[in-house]
Amino acid sequence: MIRKCLFPAAGYGTRFLPATKVLPKEMLPICTKPLIQYGVEEAMDASIYAIAIVTGRGKYTLENHFDISYELEHQIKGTIKEKRLADIRRIIDRCEFTYVRQREMKGLGHAVLTGESLIGAEPFAVVLADDLCFGDGSGVLSQMKAIFNRRRQSIVAVMDVPPSEISSYGIVLGEEIGDNLVRVNKMIEKPVAGSTDSTLAVIGRYILTEDIFAILKRVKPGKGGEIQLTDALNAQAEGGGVLAYRFKGTRYDCGSLRGFVEATNAVYKMLSHASDDRLSV
Ligand code: G1P
């Protein structure tokens, strides 16, 4: 049973400076919602309601976003604008949020380990909010949770990327076993282009078994001198414990300007199809 979802959200978002000087990158809006809200909605779509966020200094707007704003709600109560708070209100009513601060930025693996106190000894999901995913039918986490319920192994969501881009991702080597699944033999964090034939890249959706924490405690700093989640997953994979899943849906890399703009356009299109009244001038 996957009950909790961890959101590493302590990064600086330097690619979006100066916008991210005071505003956490997870709060940058894609049309009307901040990036992280899409991730939380994806967790809810997978019936995961315990949301654990690893934050850092200056990230208090995240906590405020997932809390009631009495003054605002009082002001717009009974007006047509009230329904614009409906989605966030649903999240606040249904989910439980917990937070822990990551004091030093020592990599994604370190961020996940920092979340141990919020997760405890149970399998859990991880969402990197930079990756905005729209699943076909059900959300990507929901698809992964269904696989976990059958296989009880760590799962990473993957997609093929152009060979020139492998150096931006964790890359998976393994064997296809059907049902869009690959049994992972090896994972390499951001390999140099041309150093492997695999183009199967990990995107920011994971389901991890609880032994990942013990492994992360032993993992030595890897690529960039950081504690890499990929290295811990590689250790799990050596024992045959990791699956890669080619998810059904579309992913936007909102950590890049290009992906961010593409996601904005895609969401704008969705809002126009739904004839959202906020689009009228
Ligand atoms: C992280 C992971 C990488 C993964 C990527 C997905 O890298 O380290 O393995 O492929 O997320 O977005 P980052 O993009 O944080 O540098």
Image: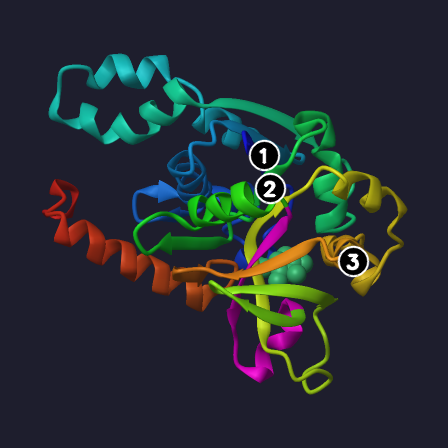
Residue 14 coordinates in the image, percent (x, y): 61, 56
How many residues crowd mark 3 within 10 Å: few (<14), some (14–19), many (20+)? many
Residue 241 coordinates in the image, percent (x, y): 71, 53
Is residue 112 visible from the viewing direction of this image? yes
Disc 1 to disc 2: CB gap under 8 Å: yes
Q: Which residue is mark 1?
A: 59
Residue 52 vs residue 237, the one in the foreground? 237
Residue 8 lies, with reference to residue 184, above or below; the image says above
Instruction: Kindly give the residue lying farthest to the bottom in the view shown.
Output: 194
Q: Is residue 154 magenta?
A: yes
- For the residues carrying marks 3 and 2, which lies nearer the camera in this image? 3
Is residue 24 visible from the viewing direction of this image? no
Q: Amino acid at mark 3?
A: Asp
Q: Residue at x 43, y 61 (%)?
A: 252
Q: Which residue is mark 3?
A: 231
Q: Point out the tag, 1 or 3, that comes first from the N-terminus.
A: 1
Q: Which residues are magenta?
A: 153-171
